[in-house]
Image (cartoon, rainbow, N blue to C red):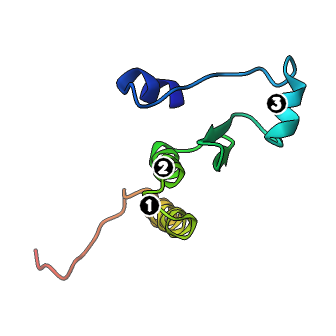
Amino acid sequence: MAHALAVASDQVQAAMVESVEFPHLANKYRVQGVPKTVINETTFQEGAAPEPLFLARVLQGIGAMTEQEVEEFIDQLRQAHDHDHDHDHDHDHDHDHGHQH
């Protein structure tokens, strides 16, 4: 996603680094998992992230969102995902809904 943002805006630069080839960078940024995205040297996203979370991290990196706001946003994403998952069952059964036939 970082590269897509860089293509879309001249305000964004993106670089991909192979941590095995550049261990000093992997150590500097404490890479534990990949991908690891570093935004303005202050904000980090480790591992694959859904687009809304990635964009929230970018907003955090430019100072448009606080870390707390991003954490609250993550909680909202989880709740929405859990809610969708709860309703993700088979609807082949009849629903009465109180209607008379």
Q: Kindly identify which residue carries mark 2.
A: 62
Residue 34: image quadrant is: top right
Q: Is residue 26 above or below residue 84?
A: above
Q: Where in the figure is residue 87, as x and y percent of width and height?
A: 43, 63
Q: Where in the figure is residue 54, as x and y percent of width and height?
A: 52, 45
Q: Residue furthest bottom?
A: 98
Q: Amino acid at mark 1?
A: Asp
Give left or right: position of 74 versus 29. left
Q: Is residue 22 above or below residue 88?
A: above
In terms of sequence position, does the residue under pointer 1 or pointer 2 come before the other?
A: 2
Q: Secondary structure at mark 3?
A: helix
**How far separated are the C-alphas under marks 1 and 2?**
31 Å
Residue drawn at x 45%, y 49% as measured from the top left: 52
Give left or right: position of 99 versus 84. left
**How far separated are the C-alphas under marks 1 and 3?**
39 Å
Q: Is residue 15 above or below residue 76?
A: above
Q: Kindly identify which residue carries mark 1.
A: 84
Residue drawn at x 56%, y 25% as measured from the top left: 14
Give left or right: position of 6 versus 67. left
Q: Kindly identify which residue carries mark 3.
A: 25
Q: Where in the figure is residue 50, as x and y percent of width and height?
A: 52, 44
In terms of sequence position, does the residue under pointer 1 or pointer 3 come before the other?
A: 3
